[in-house]
Image (cartoon, rainbow, N blue to C red):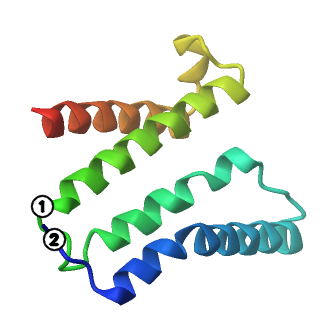
Amino acid sequence: MIQMPLTTTLLFASLPLICLAIGYGLNWLARRLFKYRLPLVDLLPIPLLISAVYLSLPVFRKAGWFFSLAICLWGIIWILTRFYFEHALYLHKFLHSWWRFIFVMSGIWYVSFLIISLL
């Protein structure tokens, strides 16, 4: 069994608060500088990025694969919510811009990593 240090456990316990603070800070900064308010869907990748940083900790040898799997599932949920909220369920409508193409490619990456990690 892998024993995590107390600091790592506290870091994971405070992860929702950290994500909330970063999301609020980004929303405040975007509203202040660009007069633009970020939708909630745009704040969903923040736990994904923070979890990727946590994967670099030396504690995660075997457990890192499970956290990678959680990151992949979070990415799939994020992409599906982007599809839903933009009403772009048709692929020919969704591929009209480059950033949407990047979303589709990252979704393919998430699904392939999910399959590889399950094998």
Q: Secondary structure at mark 1?
A: loop
x and y percent of residue 48 in the render? 46, 57
Q: What numbered label is drawn on residue 2?
A: 2
Q: Secondary structure at mark 2?
A: loop
- Residue 32 or residue 65, whichever sits in front: 65
Q: What numbered label is drawn on residue 84?
A: none
Residue type at the position of mark 2: Ile
First of labels 1, 2 by sequence position: 2
Within 10 Å of disc 2 (Cα), the crowding (few <14, some 14-19, many 20+) is few
x and y percent of residue 76 in the render? 45, 35
Within 10 Å of disc 1 (Cα), the crowding (few <14, some 14-19, many 20+) is few
Taking 6 as reference, is 66 left or right?
Answer: left
- Residue 42 or residue 102, whichever sits in front: 42
Residue type at the position of mark 1: Lys
x and y percent of residue 55 in the render? 28, 68
- Residue 47 or residue 33, whichever sits in front: 47
Name the residue rendered at 55%, 61% in the picture: 46
Q: Quadrant of residue 64?
A: bottom left
Label 1 close to label 2 by CB (< 8 Å): yes
Mark 1 → mark 2, Cα distance in angstroms = 8 Å
x and y percent of residue 75 in the render? 45, 42
Taking 91 as reference, is 24 left or right?
Answer: right
Q: Is residue 107 above or below residue 52?
A: above
Name the residue rendered at 20%, 61% in the picture: 63
User: Quarter holding the C terminus?
Assistant: top left
Taking 93 as reference, is 12 left or right?
Answer: left
Q: What numbered label is drawn on residue 62?
A: 1
